[in-house]
Image: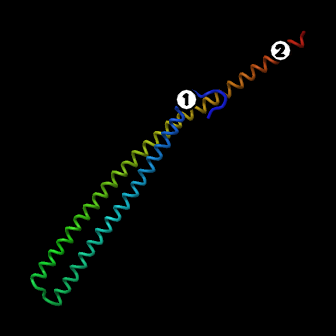
Amino acid sequence: MTNGEDYDLDVLLELREKEKGEAEERYARAMRRVEECEEEVRRNQQVLNDLVAKRREECRRFDARVCEETPQIVEIRNFDHYVQGLLDREREAKQEVDAARKALRRAKKQVEQANQEMLEAVRQLKAVEKHYEKWQREQAIEQKRRRAAKMDDVAARIWRERRR
């Protein structure tokens, strides 16, 4: 990481890099969870749509049969119970869709939180990196100054030796 002098904040720099990586992983997991929740909402909504379509089709067929022939009271009651069962299943499917949407909202909030944490980790890492870059520039200037001082010493020594 450093060359020459040791950077006093090496540990902090490594810690910030690790925190940034972990924040990115949390964000990626949260995004995957949102995708999973969206897929579950789509599946549950499709089940609900299929149930509604099935109930409507059954009612349409029964109505068509009623127009062609007169069913007995028992058949009408049985069909009413059957439709009621379909409606109950639709309500359950609607509750599943609502629960999946609620989970999706929670997952999206987690993405927002993970995104904020990731941005904060990046901000903190950049601050340490800027400090490191500044330190490197200062080290380079100091090294040039020392080199120049040594060159001045060598030049002064050569000048003194020539004067003798």
Q: Is residue 126 above or below residue 152?
A: below
Q: Position of residue 90 (x, y in %)?
A: 23, 68
Amino acid type at circle 1 is: Leu
Q: Position of residue 73 (x, y in %)?
A: 9, 82
Q: On the rendered image, what quadrant is the C terminus found in?
A: top right
Q: Report the residue at 53% width, 37% height from top.
A: 126
Amino acid type at circle 2 is: Arg
Q: Is residue 135 above or below residue 49?
A: above
Mark 1 surroundings: few (<14), some (14-19) or many (≥20) residues within 10 A: few
Q: Position of residue 163 (x, y in %)?
A: 89, 11
Q: Nearer the viewer, residue 3 or 126?
A: 3
Q: Residue furthest left?
A: 73
Q: Secondary structure at mark 1?
A: loop
Q: Quadrant of residue 3?
A: top right
Mark 1 vs mark 2: in front = 1
Q: Quadrant of residue 94?
A: bottom left
Q: Could you tell me how far apart the alpha carbons at marks 1 and 2 are, in whole angstroms?
A: 39 Å
Mark 2 surroundings: few (<14), some (14-19) or many (≥20) residues within 10 A: few
Residues at marks 1 and 2 touching, judged by CB atoms closer than 8 Å: no
The residue carrying mark 2 is 157
The residue carrying mark 1 is 9
Q: Report the residue at 18% width, 90% height from top.
A: 68
Q: Report the residue at 22% width, 83% height from top.
A: 61
Q: Nearer the viewer, residue 76 or 158?
A: 76
Q: Which mark is residue 49?
A: none
Q: Secondary structure at mark 2?
A: helix
Q: Report the residue at 28% width, 57% height from top.
A: 99
